[in-house]
Amino acid sequence: MRRWKGSLIVLLLTLLMAGSPVAAADDPATVLQRFTAARNSDVAGAIALLADTVRFVEGPICSPDSPCIGPAAVRPFLEQSLLLHVVVTATGAPQVSGATVRQRFEVRGDPFGPAGIERFVG
């Protein structure tokens, strides 16, 4: 299989803001790690980690030009990812600035195989 490498995924989450159930003592990088683990199997658990003001940027649905804002906007994207067996794995160290975390990811899933793509790294 071919390997495609590029900037497919940029995940920008603003977490730990008013209304988030996450304890204030949790640093944003830890919350992102918990969110990444939950999103691969538990949409409700992943959504519960998001603040009401989350800005989520990933793939074509929640693009940089039109991010998904708020948990309700992120939920359909995560549900679709789960149905398509999309698995996201963090790579490298997260970049943290205040309550904003940027992370590179490796993405694998059913939609990519027919195109001969094993994974996306971005």
Image: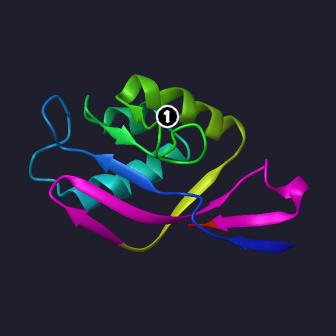
Return the residue nearer the eye: 39 or 98. Answer: 98
As displayed, is residue 78 above or below residue 107?
above
Return the residue nearer the eye: 77 or 24. Answer: 77
- What's the amino acid at mark 1? Val
Q: Residue at x 49, y 44 (%)?
A: 39
Left or right: where 102 falls relative to 26: right
Q: Residue at x 64, y 33 (%)?
A: 80
- Residue 66, given in percent of the width and then of the height, sits at 47, 36
- Residue 28, given in percent of the width and then of the height, sits at 23, 56
Q: Residue furthest left?
A: 25
- Residue 70, given in percent of the width and then of the height, sits at 34, 28
Tell me which corner region of the image, top left, top right, bottom left or bottom right, holds residue 69. top left
Residue picked out by circle 1:
43
Q: Residue at x 62, y 69 (%)?
A: 6
Left or right: where 6 falls relative to 92: right
Q: Which residues are magenta?
A: 94-120
